[in-house]
Amino acid sequence: MNQRPRRNRKSEIIRQMVQETHISAANLIFPLFIVDGVNQKTEVASMPGLYRYSIDNLLREIESCLKLGLYSFDLFPNVNEELKDKYATESYREETLYLRAIREVKANFPEACVVTDVAMDPYSIDGHDGIVENGQILNDETLEVLGKMALAHAQCGADIIAPSDMMDGRVGYIRKVLDDNGFTNVSIMSYTAKYASAFYGPFRDALNSAPKFGDKKTYQMNPANQQEALIEARLDETEGADFLMVKPALAYLDVIKLLKDNTQLPVAAYNVSGEYAMLKAAVRNGWLNEQRAVTEVLMGIRRAGASAILTYHAKEVLENKWL
Ligand code: PBG
């Protein structure tokens, strides 16, 4: 045998020498759930080890992440039911929880990179990402709401705006609103290929944001489709996105790779709540080795081509020095 690939696996030193993919803290974005009140920290039942924080505790959590070298955060609000309406007006009210949280985080930790989620669902009485009329999701009317939200986030100091709603034309619309208001330096991380997935269940529990009727299949993508992701990618690029995101990650590694091969923009991937829950449940049952399973998952997403990984594992991998 001329070629014996095992020679390059024979020791830890050589294995590390030829390792093709690496992950560092800089690749990770940590999603955090926030809730109104003071001194709140309640665990999300389906996401063991993750909590909804009131702003005071959110600041403590972020401080401990910064000490670990974890600098990027994506914030999501749990909104009281009585504040929800058909038009998500709570989302851009000046003193709303979410905007206060962004301001507080940036005031206390200007070095933190704050990613903000633009979508109506946490504030919508219908639990949908767009305005609902006669059972239909209205696309162009929704853009106006998304523009107001994005502008409010930018005014509070958001570094990256991440529209997760899947309305057509929203990246271009938001880009224009930001630019017209002088926020040319605020980035857009578009949820480019966001699939209508079963794996968002625990997240909707965390935020109490599940749709009150129907599903999200008229705006989120069909899990069977790959080529359609290229249409979304082309649109987001021409509309001015700075990052293209694929979501979920694990059942869509081919889509991450496809976008990576077809764009010069950085690709992001969202390792979603259900993927986290599934792994943690198996670990709790003693069926998987936690460190090995978590690092293998993140490595696979990175190997597929993701520069940025939004993952609920972000803090634990650094805390436990698993990378
Ligand atoms: C909502 C939104 C969702 C997630 C991020 N933003 C859920 C949904 O579309 O229903 C899911 C994240 C996760 O499951 O971890 N716009």
Image (cartoon, rainbow, N blue to C red):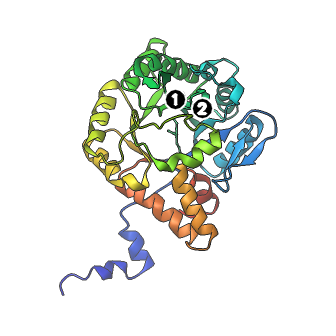
Q: Which residue is mark 1?
A: 119
Q: Position of residue 251 (x, y in %)?
A: 40, 55
Q: Is the residue marked 1 within 8 Å of ligand 1, measured from its CB?
A: yes
Compared across the picture, whether 59 is left or right of 212 comes to right
Report the residue at 55% width, 47% height from top.
201
Q: Amino acid at mark 1?
A: Ala
Q: Residue furthest right?
A: 39
| Residue 178 badge | none
Q: Give the numbered dot on residue 122.
A: 2
Q: Is residue 296 left or right of residue 30?
A: left
Q: Residue at x 48, y 14 (%)?
A: 182
Is the C-beta of the residue carrying label 2 under 8 Å from the nearest atom of ligand 1?
A: yes
Q: Residue furthest top?
A: 180
Label 1 sits on a secondary structure element that is loop
Kindly check if marks 1 and 2 are in contact, taking CB atoms under 8 A apart as contact: yes
Q: How many marks?
A: 2
Local secondary structure at mark 2: helix
In this picture, residue 208 sits left or right of residue 13: right
Q: Nearer the viewer, residue 200 or 158?
A: 200
Label 1, residues with CA under 10 Å away: few <14, some 14-19, many ≥20: many
Q: Residue at x 31, y 34 (%)?
A: 232
The residue carrying pointer 2 sits among few (fewer than 14), some (14 to 19) or many (20 or more) residues within 10 Å by Cα, namely many
- Amino acid on which disc 2 is placed: Pro
Q: Is residue 117 visible?
A: yes
Q: In this orientation, which residue lies closer to the viewer: 222 or 298?
A: 222
Q: Residue 284 at x, y = what percent?
A: 64, 68
In the rendered view of the protein, which quadrant contains the N terminus? bottom left
